Image: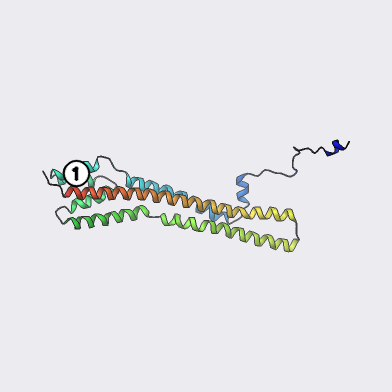
Amino acid sequence: MLLHLLQIPTTAPIAGADKISLLDLLQKGGWIMYPLYILLILTVFFFFERIIAIRKAAKIDDSFMNIIRDNIVSGNIAAARSLAKNTSNSVAKMIDKGIQRIGKPIESIERSMENVGKLEMYKMERNLSILSLIAGIAPMFGFLGTIVGMIQLFYNINNSGFELNTIAGGIYVKMITSGSGLIVGLIAYVAHNVLSTQIEKTAFKMEQASTEFLDVLQEPTK
């Protein structure tokens, strides 16, 4: 009889353990979730807008500089200029500016190409500051929602009394905004770093092409 009384079922269902969907959970975050939704949409939009623009600026044919070199060495400046002018990427724009300055001192050509390079870098970095801003303010919005929710929760406790279940449920609901804000901020941070890496790779290509072009100008023409 004693052994029978000590047998405790280990698979008994827990009463009141209701499942909740992710959408329903997010809706419990309150009005502060709407700014976070907007920040998430902006993050996705600017990431894809920038990645397309950067890849377009970085795309260059492997034979581009070889053709430019052959034309310049053979004295066919017009053909080199035509190729650079009709090629749409950052390297070609920089090389085109250098070709236009052929005949002037190397230092003048280099400065002109550097100015074009800086302008192209500025174009690629446009809107990256928005992603950096979102990465900083999204967690703050989340914490703000949590603080506002906790104030409301304690105000209700003060008016209606202390109930453990109500407090526990209220706290987990208010923490939704903090978690959402951190996730949005993390996505924006990763997006910013991915784009920055792509820009650095493009800048390296531009620097490499500039050095190669200046070396070509100092080769004897045929």
Picture quarter containing residue 119? bottom left
As helix, strand or loop, the secondary structure at mark 1 comes to helix
The residue shown at (39%, 51%) is: 196
Horizontal arrangement in the rendering, residue 100 relative to residue 46 (left or right): left
Q: Is residue 42 visible?
A: no
As drawn, the residue found furthest toward the right would be 1
- 147 w.r.t. 194: above or below: below
Structural crowding at the residue carrying mark 1, measured as other residues with C-alpha within 10 Å and reported as few (<14), some (14–19) or many (≥20): many
> Measured from the top left, where is residue 27 in percent x and y?
61, 50
Horizontal arrangement in the rendering, residue 113 relative to residue 1 (left or right): left
Horizontal arrangement in the rendering, residue 26 relative to residue 79 (left or right): right
- Label 1 sits on residue: 69
The residue shown at (32%, 46%) is: 58
> Measured from the top left, where is residue 162 in percent x and y?
75, 59
Foreground: 49 or 170?
170
As drawn, the residue found furthest toward the front would be 3
> Measured from the top left, where is residue 137 in percent x and y?
51, 58
Horizontal arrangement in the rendering, residue 153 relative to residue 70 (left or right): right
> Measured from the top left, where is residue 149 in percent x and y?
64, 59
- Disc 1 residue type (three-letter): Arg
- 89 w.r.t. 138: above or below: above
Please count the marks in the image. 1
